[in-house]
Amino acid sequence: MTPTRPNILFIMSDDHAAHAMSCYGSRINTTPQIDRIAREGMRFDNCFCTNSLCAPSRASIMSGTYSHINGVRILSDKLDPGTDTFVRRLQASGYQTALVGKWHLYTEPRGFDYYKMLPGQGLYHDPYFIESGSRFDWESITNQHDETMGLQERGYVTDLIADSCIKWLDQRDPEKPFMLMCHHKAPHRPWETDEKHKDMYADIDIPEPETLYDDYATRSRAAREAKMRVGEHMYATDVKREIPGELHGNELRSWAYQYYIKDYLRCVASIDDNVGRLLDYLDENGLAENTLVIYTSDQGFFLGDHGWYDKRFMYEESLRMPFVVRYPKEIAAGAVNTDIILNHDFPALFLELAGADIPKAWQGRSFRPLLHGETPTDWRTGMYYRYWEHGGHGVFAHYGLRTERYKLIYYYGDPLDTGCGYNEVKEPEWELFDLEKDPRELRNVYADDEYVDVVKELKNELHRLQAEAGDERYYKDK
């Protein structure tokens, strides 16, 4: 008997920017296996995260709520083990549930019949895994690359994760639907490649992004002071070679970009190969028709854009998540959607497709109608974002609004504070970008006379969405 409710294969990578996928028009690489999902299903062009950091995004995906509600606002926060997650609800409704790969929420995964997770960030080569049923001190788990945790396996982490996913699929009960979360570590730094792809791009130069030499003119102090510029703020371990001391400024940035981006893309290539392995498994076992397949990343990433690497900012490259989905029963092949969806919407979609109740306390909304090409008349036209952690890379704490045309950002916190509070800055700053005229976000028009009315309207909408989300407004926000 084949399950009538859909199986769900959720594949998520770490720091894989949409503009490093050929189905999103990448200028720097191709991803033929991920493209299969888009070609046979739907590509979402405006999928955004509500807090561009690994742990907070993952917590929102699990819980259907914003960071200030689920309690995971910064990298070191732990997800409350009692959190009402979509996985628990799927399990209760009869789904087989499994997680393989990166968890990064520092408490034991709950609601999974089986898990095999990397401790903390995990290692690229010969990684350690913590498997369900093993004895483990969960209070000791950290964000470090701790080689003493779990059992070690030989091989490359991306291959091993796919191996374990396929093994679990082979051993599952075919009479029940499944939810399998395949969470890749790659392409998170330090961008260690596998043997198969180590010479990929060796004889070519990767095209530089248009904003690699951004000088941050007209923009906030936050943009100028962020410590994540390619070359200048990288370590030798990031580019796998000694950084020449005689290189400075744009020359250093250009040199480091080639090493950084090639290693990053080599990690992406390994992910793509293993996505293909999972898609082939579904085809070969007659599971493709009744399986919802998703490929996404926990947030975006700067690939030299604005001269940066890493994420955190509300700028497009960091805010946007890739999201391609295939489900032949409901999605027309080759479809593209431009409506705004958020990472905390994912769990409501899963529960609706599974016929399970969606908690009223959840803040996300199922976007099942969008899969059919139907946009509800009351669908959101803007989204609320907030970043708390301002110890990492010197990025100021900020919140903001992104609509279909505009982006308004308010920087209120000093990056010297590494906790979850903030040191008051003397002069909080605003940025406004007209995405229609300035898609690269190079010109802050907040103080321009022609945008006076726009600023007023956007602030009102920002505060409305902030209140709707149950978040607090910074007291100097006027």
Image (tube, helix red, strand yellow):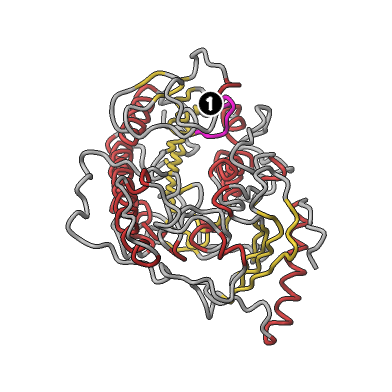
Q: Quadrant of residue 279?
A: top left
Residue at far left of view: 203
Image side of residue 213 versus residue 343, left or right: left
- Image quarter where the N terminus lies is top left
- Image quarter where the C terminus lies is bottom right
Residue of label 1? 112
Which element carries disc 1, helix, strand or loop?
Answer: loop
Magenta residues (range): 103-111
Q: Where is residue 117 drawn, in percent x and y?
A: 46, 28
Residue at far top of view: 135
Q: Where is residue 380 drawn, in percent x and y?
A: 65, 62
Magenta-colored segment: predominant secondary structure: loop
Query: Can you see residue 368?
Result: no
Q: Nearer the viewer, residue 274 or 135?
A: 135
The amino acid beneath tag 1 is Phe
Query: Can you see residue 23?
Result: yes
Q: Residue at x 29, y 24 (%)?
A: 154
Rendered view: 420 above or below 150:
below
Q: Quadrant of residue 147?
A: top left
Q: Residue at x 63, y 47 (%)?
A: 389
